[in-house]
Amino acid sequence: MTKDKLDIEPFRQWSPAGDNLLLIAGPCSAESERQVMNTAAQLIEHKINIFRAGIWKPRSKPYTFTGCGEKGIPWLLAVKREFHLPVMVEVMNADQLKLVLDKGIDYIWLGARTTINPYMMDEISEALHGCDIPVFIKNPISPDLNTWIGALERINGAGIRKMATIHRGFQSVYSAPLRNEPHWDIPVKLKCTYPDLPILCDPSHIAGETKYIEDIVTKALALETSGLMVEVHNNPSEALSDDKQQLTPTQFGKMLKNVNFHDRCRTLASNTPEQEEVIAKINTCRQIIDGCNEDLIKVLAQRMAAVKEIGEAKRKIELPALQASRWRDVMNQCLSLADELGLSKELVTEIMDVIHKYSIKIQ
């Protein structure tokens, strides 16, 4: 393994979906054997590849449901026997890892609260030495690509070659309808760094509410995700955790149909290798641009909200909207930064002039 390369097995060789998109689904939490079995029985109709369920749940607040713990493992093994589905759980420390390895769980994932903590990652990595279990690594809570890469390097350094990542969004200081900000540019940059690394999407945690899931899946598929991990509960209204973001099996099936999930497969276009390389580069750059555009609009909205508050304050003490000295300072600061970053001063001047004119208008 080098700084810009991971020693991993090709995804199609160990993914139960082979060359097709991988589909992982199941409840946020395993709550009872009946709930787990009922959900799995309905999900096999939708051709899922892996059944997932949390048995240990890291919660923000104490005295909330923290998972069923070890007693949920036999429920998952019953799913494995009854429906011939591989099963998957989240682990957060070496003891949990050793337990699921001993019991025969097929796959594990590491959550956002784990990947952000180097000490936890070191502990888990040490416990993984000599193991062959596939590991899925979610992005950290913070939008920090280097932290995500560090988690990957630790797991790969432990000898794990069956690796994949899961994009589940990032916490944000901005108020937004989504539970976690997608920051689509971050998984795109990760893909640019490690082209062979599979990146799945977890639309449930990005969305926070089921009404946003289909749009997020559509975006993820457009960005050529390697698969999905979706939270599905047989009766979300009675779920003990994250009820609002869990689909029913029926809703899940409808969503898959609407996005044409099962008809999508990895077929190569009839282009030369050189053309494929150029097309891939163009698509990657477009994905980065899309992410930047999204960030620009959000920052612009925040700026205009501050402008509006300033205008209201100025009117209270009858100050004019235009403050020439303040505007000169702003422009000098922006042009100095543009010079440092190698941006065209003409471009920055035109953009800032438009923003300033509109700011004066709303003040």
Image (spheres, rainbow, N blue to C red):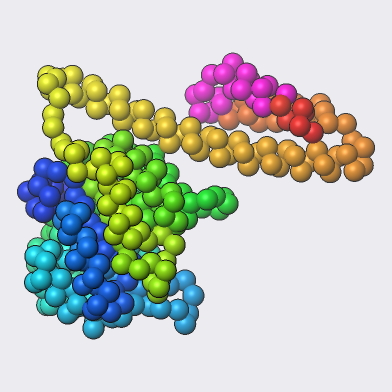
The answer to whether residue 201 shows anywhere in this view is no
Q: From the viewer's perspective, tell me whether residue 231 is left or right of residue 19.
A: right
Residue at image point 48% right, 51% down: 178
Check residue 342 for magenta coloring.
yes
Residue at image point 12% right, 50% down: 17
Q: Quadrant of residue 226?
A: top left
Q: Magenta part of the protein: which range?
A: 338-357
Residue 225 lies, in percent from the top left, at 26, 42
Q: Is residue 113 above or below residue 328?
A: below
Please tell me which residue lies in front, 184 or 253: 253
Residue 279 lies, in percent from the top left, at 24, 23
Residue at image point 19% right, 50% down: 22
Q: Main secondary structure of the magenta part?
A: helix
Residue 278 lies, in percent from the top left, at 23, 21
Residue extending farthest top: 346
Residue 261 lies, in percent from the top left, at 24, 43
Check residue 265 for magenta coloring.
no
Q: From the viewer's perspective, tell me whether residue 358 is left or right of residue 283.
A: right
The answer to whether residue 195 shows anywhere in this view is yes
| Marker count (numbered) | 0
- Looking at the figure, which quarter contains the C terminus? top right
Q: Quadrant of residue 240?
A: bottom left
Q: Is residue 279 above or below residue 232?
A: above
Please tell me which residue lies in front, 251 or 322: 251
Residue at image point 8% right, 72% down: 81
